[in-house]
Image: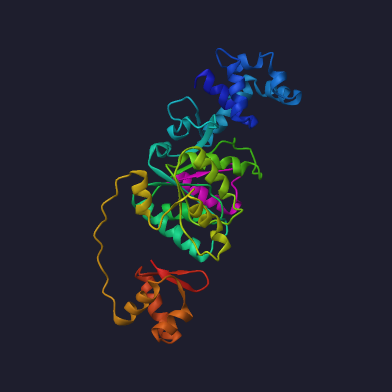
């Protein structure tokens, strides 16, 4: 590592804003830890207790220990201005100076879409997120999201399930995966995609980190897709960052009576969002070449199965509605639904609701 890389990696322990690191580097002709601790302006830049801590941690032994611990944990630190830093972030006004990474760094250069939305999606939100993520992965796009409950985790899991690639941007350090229930998902992403954070591993999660994290989610995507979000959703932060960065905002329309679709519908109404109903809309708008679809072997359906498919073409339905519209008793219907689910024709959602796969 160069002296500059070592200095910035060392500074990463103190959770400094980009502007503050800019100020520090501007004071040094040759950035290095030795020159940093000799700066007379340190007391003007930081409170006295922080200055004392910085000088204490600047000992060669402590710096070496910090760097070796990162290596032992398989963490790569990519630094702004260096070759492996994501090109999509370089020109952003508030681009992070450093990113802690675990996984495949080549994903930074791939075509990508950031998928965001509510942490508590409806069945409709889960369905459309699952569908769009599936189609976008099949088009070769990397899925970027924030590892949160709801839309984020659905998007990550679908990418992994289909053998696609996904990037998760954390609002905490690697030692404090949030939410804790997603630790296994984070590990799977680390193994088959890319896990990143601008916070050093020891930094715990707090409510201020997540809106700040959203600028990276917005920046890493060639565009962002909002599948379902309420009016006061934190998704608004990601949307604002995307618009500031000149990224297109794609929006899935929702039920006008659903609070969970209030933000998405408003973005379409105001012209801030581009209404999309299938992945092809996004691929075309971004100027990506659409992949040729593989020929699929059509399954031969009997009359009852075809009736069920026809009913579900109009949207998801619960078992009682399907029973009534197909004129089948529940026991017989259950057998057909089970066979069709195993064959991959339909999918069962929570609450006994079914939809076409």
Please indicate whether residue 22 sits to the left or right of residue 311 in the image: right
**Which stretch did the figure color magenta?**
166-191
Residue plotted at (49% across, 37% down): 245
Where is 13 relative to 170, above or below?
above
Q: x, y percentage for residue 172?
A: 60, 42
Q: Which of 7 and 233 is in front in this view?
A: 233
Q: Is residue 186 magenta?
A: yes
Q: Which of 321 and 149 is in front in this view?
A: 321
Residue plotted at (28% across, 50% down): 291
Residue plotted at (40% across, 76% down): 337
Can residue 163 be seen by looking at this rendering? Answer: no
Q: Is residue 207 magenta?
A: no
Q: Quadrant of residue 7?
A: top right
Where is 253 relative to 89, above or below?
below
Q: Which of 110 and 275 is in front in this view?
A: 275
Q: x, y percentage for residue 208?
A: 65, 42
Q: Nearer the viewer, residue 65 or 330?
A: 330
Q: As drawn, which residue projects farthest toward the right?
A: 48
Q: As drawn, which residue projects farthest toward the front?
A: 270
How many numbered tags mark residues here? Answer: 0
Q: x, y percentage for residue 62?
A: 63, 24
Where is 120 relative to 41, above or below?
below
From the image, which quarter does the C terminus lie in? bottom left
Please indicate whether residue 193 sits to the left or right of residue 211 in the image: left
Where is 69 relative to 113, above or below?
above
Q: x, y percentage for residue 71?
A: 52, 32
How is this picture coloured? rainbow
């Amino acid at each position: 590592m160069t002296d500059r890389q070592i200095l910035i990696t060392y500074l990463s322990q103190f959770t400094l804003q980009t502007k503050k690191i800019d100020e520090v580097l501007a004071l040094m002709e040759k950035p290095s830890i030795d020159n940093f601790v000799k700066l007379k302006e340190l007391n003007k830049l930081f409170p006295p207790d922080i200055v004392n801590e910085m000088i204490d941690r600047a000992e060669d032994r402590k710096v070496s220990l910090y760097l070796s611990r990162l290596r032992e944990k398989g963490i790569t630190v990519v630094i702004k201005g260096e070759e492996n830093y994501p090109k999509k972030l370089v020109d952003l006004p508030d681009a992070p100076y450093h990113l802690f990474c675990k996984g495949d760094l080549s994903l930074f250069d791939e075509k990508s879409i950031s998928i965001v939305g509510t942490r508590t999606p409806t069945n409709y939100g889960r369905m459309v997120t699952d569908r769009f993520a599936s189609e976008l992965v099949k088009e070769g796009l990397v899925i970027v999201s924030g590892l949160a409950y709801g839309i984020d985790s659905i998007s990550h899991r679908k990418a992994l399930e289909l053998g696609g690639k996904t990037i998760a941007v954390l609002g905490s350090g690697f030692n404090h995966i949030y939410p804790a229930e997603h630790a296994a998902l984070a590990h799977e992403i680390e193994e088959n995609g890319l896990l990143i954070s601008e916070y050093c591993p020891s930094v715990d999660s707090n409510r201020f980190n997540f809106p700040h994290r959203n600028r990276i989610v917005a920046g890493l995507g060639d565009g962002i897709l909002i599948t379902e979000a309420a009016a006061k959703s934190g998704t608004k932060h990601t949307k604002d960052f995307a618009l500031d960065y000149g990224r297109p905002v794609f929006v899935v329309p929702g039920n006008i009576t659903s609070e969970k679709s209030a933000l998405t519908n408003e973005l379409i109404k105001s012209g801030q969002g581009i209404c999309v109903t299938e992945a092809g809309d996004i691929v075309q708008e971004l100027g990506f070449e659409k992949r040729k679809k593989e020929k699929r072997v059509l399954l031969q359906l009997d009359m009852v199965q075809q009736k069920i498919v026809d009913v579900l073409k109009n949207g998801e339905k619960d078992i009682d509605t399907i029973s009534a519209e197909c004129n089948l008793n529940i026991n017989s219907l259950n057998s057909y639904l089970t066979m069709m689910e195993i064959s991959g024709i339909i999918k069962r959602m929570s609450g006994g609701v079914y939809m076409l796969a």
